Amino acid sequence: MALYSEKVMDHFRNPRNVGVIEDADGVGEVGNPVCGDIMKIYLKINDQQIIDDVKFETFGCGSAIASSSMATELIMGKPVSEALQLTNKAVTEALDGLPPHKLHCSVLAEEAIKSAVKDYYDKNDIEYDPADFPEEHDCEACHVN
Amino acid sequence: MALYSEKVMDHFRNPRNVGVIEDADGVGEVGNPVCGDIMKIYLKINDQQIIDDVKFETFGCGSAIASSSMATELIMGKPVSEALQLTNKAVTEALDGLPPHKLHCSVLAEEAIKSAVKDYYDKNDIEYDPADFPEEHDCEACHVN
Amino acid sequence: MFVYADNAATTAVSKKVVDAMLPYFTEVYGNPSSLYSVGQKAKEVLEESREKVAAILGAKPREIYFTSGGSEADNQAIMSAAKAGAKKGKKHIISSKFEHHAVLHTLQALEKEGFEITLVDVHENGVIDPKEIEDAIREDTALVTIMYANNEIGTIQPIAEIGRICREKKVWFHTDAVQAISHVHINVEEQNIDMLSISAHKFHGPKGVGVLYVKGGIPVSNVIYGGAQERGKRAGTENLAGIVGLTVALEDAVANIDANNEHLAPLQERLIQGLSQIPYSELNGDRHARVTSNVNFCFEGIEGESLLLLLDDKGVAVSSGSACTSGSLDPSHVLLAIGRPHEVAHGSLRISLGEDATEEQVDYIIKSVAEVIEYLRSFSPFWGDLISGKRNHVFAEHKEIA
Amino acid sequence: MFVYADNAATTAVSKKVVDAMLPYFTEVYGNPSSLYSVGQKAKEVLEESREKVAAILGAKPREIYFTSGGSEADNQAIMSAAKAGAKKGKKHIISSKFEHHAVLHTLQALEKEGFEITLVDVHENGVIDPKEIEDAIREDTALVTIMYANNEIGTIQPIAEIGRICREKKVWFHTDAVQAISHVHINVEEQNIDMLSISAHKFHGPKGVGVLYVKGGIPVSNVIYGGAQERGKRAGTENLAGIVGLTVALEDAVANIDANNEHLAPLQERLIQGLSQIPYSELNGDRHARVTSNVNFCFEGIEGESLLLLLDDKGVAVSSGSACTSGSLDPSHVLLAIGRPHEVAHGSLRISLGEDATEEQVDYIIKSVAEVIEYLRSFSPFWGDLISGKRNHVFAEHKEIA
Ligand SMILES: Cc1ncc(COP(=O)(O)O)c(C=O)c1O
Ligand SMILES: Cc1ncc(COP(=O)(O)O)c(C=O)c1O
């Protein structure tokens, strides 16, 4: 009944994997300041295509910060292919839910990771299925445009 | 601020001159049960046209009973001509005021006395100015008709 | 002796309810829309209250809207159905002749906007015949609104049956349950109720807070526009202390319905039998289909206001007509609706017992009423005309009440 | 330390007010419309409250209507003027871009019914130019409604002057004084105000009760239809405990306006100077034409909700935007109205001090805000872009506030 679940508050108050990876193999950024949230994901990926390290920076509300934090935890140490399967639903569930009008934060987290993976694929000339990288969602959620 | 002034409550609780004069010289009745109030006034008038005794019976609300009581007090021992001058305003003032929607009770009291005096004039073939006896007010006040 | 027997007008707030409200004035005073802890704590309590009220009514929390009282709830139910109806060309509403003014005056406002209103008869016993509702329903009927129990004569309406008919005919059904909720077991699902109004101050909660239940899927329109409170349907910072008070009072009232009825039924019977001894008097409304707290009589030859003022002097607080029209000179529209002539309607008395009423109090009421009636009749020219035969009686001298 | 600094959202009910309310729950619980003593005692207190409120506002008792809060009062003022206007073919209303939603959403509802709404500009300083109101008034203008003080940025409007213009042009003038009544001396007669709204919970009274003042002669329409309460203009059994609470709270608030302002002004100055030290921040709304309790800032590179949640963790209860829109993702319409770009409007903070605020609390707020801002900026990619020059700053690094 509180604004956010304990999990969300925990990840908001003590966000995991905050920061920058200077020599990242893939970087993704989604959102924009007009809408009130930006997420930036840094990936360090090893030869076996395993995510060795992940960090994030986020400008946004409590659930945006918590969603980024949770998303990084969920993909840390995972193969890139698995990170690509991460859905906003998985992020939301791992956080024990989000208020309906905050669900877009988990969508942003999913998109930010996909965007970082795509950057890694692009940089390394790895082929991929474009269907795995849907268009970024438009600004509907924040009604501004 | 209370519903009724102390004066009204006093005359309501302890009405003066309640009852019937069996051999009245003039009797007046106004109002009707559909409207929720009837007043009946009995006058005993002596040769000098002085009101020797007056009694009333009333069916009605608190202010109807109080108005009748006060009206009888105001004309007791007075010449008939003076009783004819009694206005509803005088009754209201003597009662320290009535709520606006109860003013018609004082009008009824005035009319009941006039009606009793008229009855006395008629019975004794005394001439009078019809202008002193306006038509009884219609049932507007109680919205029923 | 002091007996407050006007519980249909309003009730005293119970000590338990006051105690439950107090923290929400000075401790958990946050605005439930605020994001920090003292606001979120308030929000939590608000939503818990909503869940409790919903559970009691057999509804879902999302179907519960807190309002400023029974009148606002009635207004919003009717206006919502009217707006939605008008969009589909449905501008006919069915109600009854003896609804509360919160319903009747709202319907009058809609009439001015081109709605057609059918008011069904309430018969001599004050009970509506569902068949007449069925017959009144038309293609363009937007709403049926019928009160659960009447506020003056306490008669209980066949709500579940009316609801069934409305469901069948696919017409929305609202019931003003302000006078029923603490006397009758109500379940909106089982009783086919689409919208329902209640008001806290009728069951030992505070004044100024009520509930509107609206079944999911029925569009709710604002009566008060503004902030996003109550899912955008009722603006205004939530009166949390009041809402908590309503909830605690409702839980108490509903949990005790059976015990209270068991206690009140014999007292009601005693009161009715006692007052019937007064010659030329009659009970208003059905003897059986009525809430156990309510007794309403008409007495020939006297007028209600003077009756109740003299009863007040004896410490008996009762009413004539309903409280909200007591400034008016018109006789009760409820008594006229059950066919009482004007002259008897003026001489009415409503007694609404509290749950803590005693036999001693009831006997004191009977004795006091009998005395005052006798006194008032002693100088009532109307009474004189009746006993002298100059006017005709409406009632029999004595009527057996079975 | 715990500092409640969101008094513009709502206030704690004062102990004095709670004590004043208590008897009206359990002792003088009668329905003010009832004729017996416990009802008439309630009626007396109701009318005394009306007289006291009227005296404070410079109005007549007959011009005071008790409502369920500020929102209802705003709705009723606007709807009344609109109905009366429509009858004369006047379907144009003037308001401003940063009114409370209780005003703006009511105006939107009227727009759907064919009214034309002009919203005047509120300029960068959040203060309306009366000249623009004058220019906007047309032959068919039914109402001008302008808030007295803004609920987010606290700016005070030139109400007496706007009122003067409206009198001259014979247009009714309503002001939402919900945020002003406890900070500014208001007299409806002297300040040419035709209608005015206030809400008890903004000055240590209970939630769920407010006042609408309407100058005699202006027709009032019902928002809630039903019983004859409030001279037939607002149905519903009167919330007497709430009305008494409002009255006592209002007396206290108004009696202490000067003392409170004297106490708060230096604290406000300290807060503004302290927060200005945070780089790339700016005060919202005029420095001088504002209530002494309000400080509102925008900070670049951070988002308001995370700011206030972390402040809550430090025991500082403040808001971002207004409470009733905090469920929304849109940036404050008030900040957009004074010309803040979206990206800065998202990073706003409203601090509204209580009358008992201390220097120590203010310093704690400043320190806490500075810490949280620094922390949030440390991992904000938006902030990173700003300092790296990838995006352009909106504010200067430091701005002197005179
Ligand atoms: C300026 C203004 N107007 C109206 C309101 C609405 O008052 P209430 O919440 O009492 O309905 C508020 C506060 O919520 C306000 O700040
Ligand atoms: C049947 C009925 N409906 C509605 C109301 C109105 O409730 P409130 O006074 O809470 O607005 C009342 C009582 O006043 C009532 O008895």
Image (cartoon, coloured by chain):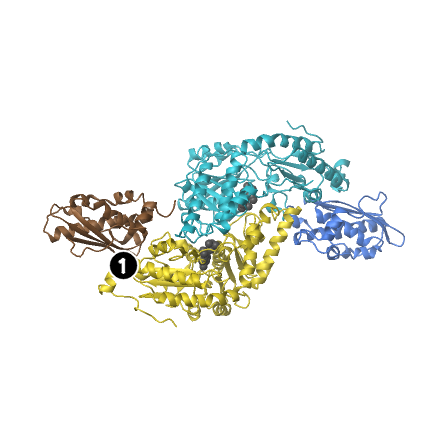
Chain colours: A brown, B blue, C cyan, D yellow
Nearest to the observer: residue C66 or residue A86: A86
Does the image show residue D96?
A: no
Q: Quadrant of the C terminus of chain D?
A: bottom left
Q: Which residue is mark 1?
A: D378
Dividing the picture into quadrants, the one containing residue D255 is: bottom right
Q: Quadrant of residue D353?
A: bottom left
Residue D49 showing in the rendered view: yes
Residue D182: % across, % down = 50, 62
Viewer-nearest residue: D278 or D302:
D278
Name the residue located 61 percent from the left edge and 45 percent from the top edge. C323
Count of marks overlaid on the render: 1
The quadrant of the rendered image in which ligand 2 is seen is: top right
Q: Chain of mark 1?
A: D
Q: Quadrant of the N terminus of chain D?
A: bottom left
* Three-letter code, disc 1: Ser
Query: C85 left or right of B125?
Result: left
Can you give x and y, in whole percent of width and height, for residue C338 in the image?
Answer: 60, 36
In the shown orientation, is residue D47 left or right of residue C73?
A: right
Position of D141 relative to C177 (above/below): below
Q: Name the residue at the bottom extreme.
A: D402
| Residue D55 locus on image (x, y percent) | 59, 62
Q: Residues within 10 Å of mark 1 (few under 14, many from 20)?
A: some
Seen as rendered, the residue at the extreme right is: B47
Which element type, helix, strand or loop, lies under badge 1? helix
Residue sitting at x 67%, y 48%: B139
